[in-house]
Amino acid sequence: MSDHPFIKRIDWLLVAFILPIVTAGLFTMKSFVPSESQGNFFGKQLIWLAISLVIFFVFSHIDFRFLKRTDIIVYLFLFFLSFLFILFVLGHVSHGAKSWFSLGGFSFQPSDMMKLVVILILAKYYSRRHVEIKNPKHIFISGLYALVPFLLVFLQPDFGSAIIIFFIWFGMTMVSGISKKHLLVVFLGGAVVLGILWLFVFAPYQKARIANFINPMTNIHGSGYNALQSTIAVGSGQVLGKGLGFGTQSRLKFLPEFQTDFVFAAFAEEWGFIGSLLLMLLFGLVIWRILHNASLGESNFEMLFGMGVAIYFMSHILINVGMNMGIMPVTGITLPFMSYGGSHLLTEFAALGILMGMRGYSRPAHRDDMKNEFLGL
């Protein structure tokens, strides 16, 4: 039975670690009191979860070696870039950002899938140039692939998704074998870019979020309200939590966006420090399995893709949990597998499905051999 393709291609340990996270998100949503404006988060999320799992298992049985073709990757990249351009004309405005296509009761956020496409095109670029990777020009050329979607997403404005695209590029650049000296140049360049963004690009509300990061109490009735209420919710859970359905911050609607951006705060209020610790452990195990599958990649392309997926998840987790705890700016980033919404859930399971498809033709190899090939030593 273990040799059956359906069994062999799937990393069932990875699935086992994801299911409790998904369940925790569903239970937290189930405890919310639905209203006409909120709808049934639990029921809708179940539908999105079912669709996402179908995509995961279908993708798991596809041979993705065709993605190594330059023309396929370029067409894919341009296809999703076109969606980002069209958003400026046909996009639906939500919370001040034109980030969604809305068709009746269905909404789709193209920036989520764009993150996955950025991982693919960077994996393709770096895998072809691992022998000459120490040449600093590859930092700038790869940066252009990330810069175009970064700017299009930033101008929506969706600062959170833009930051994730930047972290994907930066993380994949670091693991590609780039010289540490050149990485220092990237750090300095990033600092200069941030300074320019602050002076000439950041909108007042984005500056307010960063100011609240330094001192959240400066405007607790305005731009600092979300961060304050989230911190209160996390702290009020104490060690064991208030219990499922007894989270007062979310049920009484003091905590905004408790089903999406601040689902971790709603969870922490009900499950406490112990529950939050177990949740972080599960996320850590998910990252471990992703990196394990990446290490078995047939070539540098599969290995880099798996590492990019790990960076994608780590960025979302660290930023979302950080902003829920008041130690990072509020950027509108979802928590993987837990936050309400279909676009990010489809993207997450699609990314893992592609990784499982690559697992189907993976090669076991000695760790030192893989490291030497990957770094071009």
Image (tube, rainbow, N blue to C red):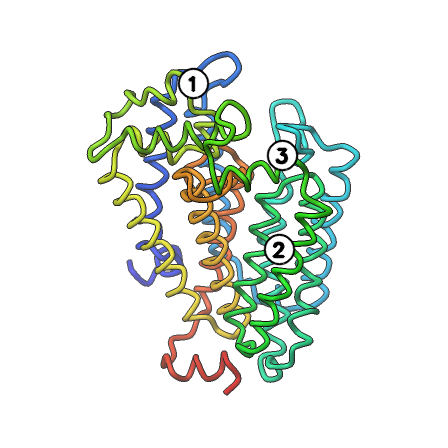
Which residue matches tag 1? Answer: 253
Judge the density around disc 1: few (<14), some (14-19), many (≥20) Cα neighbours within 10 Å.
Answer: few
Given the current orientation, which residue lies at the most extreme right position?
A: 89
* Percent of width and height locating residue 25: 37, 34
Pointers 2 and 3 in contact (C-beta within 8 Å): no
- Of the numbered discs 2 and 3, the one sitting upstream in the chain is 2
* Percent of width and height locating residue 178: 56, 76
Of residue 264 and residue 69, the one placed in the foreground of this image is 264
Q: Residue at x 38, y 22 (%)?
A: 250
Given the current orientation, which residue lies at the most extreme top position?
A: 36
User: Disc 2 residue type?
Assistant: Val
Q: Secondary structure at mark 3?
A: helix
User: Disc 1 residue type?
Assistant: Lys
Distance from disc 1 to disc 2, alpha carbons, whole Å, reads 36 Å
In the image, residue 80 sits, relative to residue 204, either above or below, namely below
Which residue matches tag 2? Answer: 117
